[in-house]
Amino acid sequence: MSDESKIAETGTLEARVRELEAQIESLSSQLKPDSLAKRIDSSYLSTNNLRVFLQILALIQTVFVAGAIAFGFVGFTNIMAIRTETEKVREAGKTIENSVKRAAEAESTIRTQVAAFDERLKRVDATFGEKQKQMDQKLVLVQTSVDNATKTMQRKTEDSLNSMKGNMDQRLADAEKEIRKVNKQLSSISTTFNKVGISNEKILSAREKQLLFLLAKEIDPDNPIFNFNTGILAFSFGRYDEAIIALDKVIKAQNVPSNIITKAKETRSTSMKLKQSPPEVKANEPKGVAIGDYVILQLHLNSRP
């Protein structure tokens, strides 16, 4: 049963109790002696009839009083029960009201906290926006610095490559000049020995030893000067295999780097195509190999500080 229905039922019982009390008061007033006397006088009843009538009235009064008491007790009991329920309802209402107040206070507190948190978020957002702007500016500066450094590095690299290319071209040109000089020297040496009349292989061998002894500081197979002169003389006499062996010894003794050897091979291949080179000279034949060894030594000597 809801609280409203209980309150309505309480009001109905209170109204019935008031009606019963009004009826009891009316009957009590009618049963007073003065009222009875007046009625007796007015109705001209006899004494016996009056006694009987009074007894009946007393019985009726007793019945009514007992009924009123019974109804009053029941009504009082109901009223007390209703009042108890009403008190409970009132207590529940007070509890609900207190809960509503606490909820309102909690809502107010939450609203205050939300407003404070929103304010903090706004400040954080403003700070983050400022930091983001500073980071963007720094990134722009870094990108500009990187671009400038990249351009500078590219310019320096290009200058260095151009310089290296110029040096390389100059060295190749110098090597080609040396090759032409060697060809002239070899041709001159060969012509000189031919004029001397060296044609016999035994005489050539003896003269070769004599010339080697004069050109070398000492006759030592491990002496680079001895091997170099041996290679040049062997080449002059057309003994290209022996020239290759002697010049290879010099190359090994000088610890010529592999890049110099590779460069010499490229230079030798280029020099074989020059107009100044004899058409019978080929890079893969003994004479071409001997010339290549000489180019290797010349490049190695030119590359040293």
Image (tube, grey):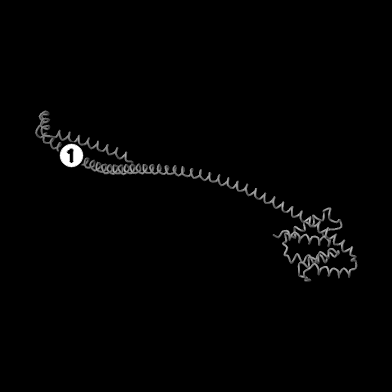
Q: Position of residue 12 (x, y in %)?
A: 27, 37
Seen in the picture, residue 122 relative to 236 is either above or below; the reply is: above
Which residue in the structure is indicated by mark 1? Answer: 65
- Quadrant including the C terminus: bottom right
* Lateral position of residue 217 relative to residue 87, left or right: right
Q: At 87% from the left edge and 62% from the top edge, which residue is drawn?
A: 192
Q: Position of residue 60 (x, y in %)?
A: 17, 37
On the image, which quarter does residue 39 sit in? top left
Comparing 213 with 79, the one in front is 213
* Residue extending furthest toward the left: 47
Per the image, label 1 sits on a secondary structure element best described as helix
Comparing 298 with 196, the one in front is 196
On the image, which quarter does residue 247 sit in? bottom right
Comparing 146 with 118, the one in front is 146
- Quadrant including the N terminus: top left
Q: At 84% from the left edge and 54% from the top edge, which residue is drawn?
A: 276
Seen in the picture, residue 136 relative to 177 is either above or below; the reply is: above
Answer few, some or many: residues within 10 Å of disc 1's Cα (few below 14, many 20 plus, some between 14 and 19): some
Q: Position of residue 289 (x, y in %)?
A: 81, 61
Q: At 60% from the left edge and 46% from the top edge, which residue is drawn?
A: 148
Q: How many marks?
A: 1
* Lateral position of residue 90 relative to residue 296, left or right: left
On the image, which quarter does residue 94 sit in? top left
Q: Position of residue 69 (x, y in %)?
A: 19, 41
Q: Amino acid at mark 1?
A: Val
Comparing 143 with 79, the one in front is 143
Q: At 81% from the left edge and 60% from the top edge, which residue is drawn?
A: 291
* Residue extending furthest toward the top: 42
